[in-house]
Image: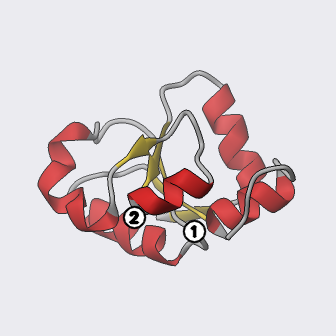
Amino acid sequence: MQEIDPARAQAMMEAGTGTVLLDVREPWELKIAALPAAVHIPMQDVPDRLSELAADRDLIVVCHHGNRSRVVARYLEQNGFGRVFNLAGGIDAWAQQLEPGMAEY
């Protein structure tokens, strides 16, 4: 698992290579701030929903500050996902660095 900053994550998403942004936050958090391109699977549901994720694609995992997503990213690696990135600083860093108008919490 690699740490990735918001600018690099955005560039990967815009490159059109099939990168998946996996948001592992809770539904109430998405109501405050969401990234439209993200696939949402709450952290506790990831083990039961692994089949919904492609192990052959780059996966960028995001949460609020990057801690839960780091745990999920490690879990994904342990379960056969080889190209996993953790969004350093989470959606909070994304908002501060890329979308200053995004709601923060």
Q: Gap in Å between the C-alphas at discs 2 and 1?
A: 14 Å
The part of the image, by quadrant, that contains residue 93 is bottom right
Q: Viewed as shown, does residue 63 lie left or right of 57? A: right
The residue at the point 84 percent across, 49 percent down is 101
Q: Is mark 1 on a helix, strand or loop?
A: loop
Q: Where is residue 72 in the image (x, y as percent from the top left)?
A: 36, 67
Q: Image height check: is 18 above or below 50? A: above
Q: Is 47 situated left or right of 77 in this image? A: left
Horizontally, residue 86 falls left or right of residue 82, namely right
Count of numbered labels shown in the rendering = 2
Relative image position of residue 7 (x, y in whole percent): 78, 48
Amino acid residing under circle 1? His
What coloring was used for the rendering?
secondary structure
The residue positioned 67% from the left and 28% from the top of the image is: 14
Residue 53: x and y in percent read 27, 40
Q: Identify the disc placed on residue 73.
A: 2
Residue at image location 33% in from the left, 59% down from the top? 42
Vertical arrangement, residue 35 with respect to residue 1, above or below: above
Please tell me in which quadrant of the rendered image residue 26 appears: bottom left
Q: Which of marks 2 and 1 is nearer the N terminus?
A: 1
Depth check, front residue: 77 or 44: 44
**Few, some or many residues within 10 Å of mark 1 (<14, 14–19, 20+):** many
Question: Disc 1 marks which residue?
Answer: 64
Whether residue 50 can be seen here: yes
Depicted 78 relative to depicted 22: above or below? below
Is 101 or 10 nearer to us in this picture?
101
User: Element under label 2?
Assistant: helix
Q: What residue type is labelled 2?
A: Ala
- Does the image show residue 88? no
User: Which one is in front, 19 or 25?
Assistant: 25
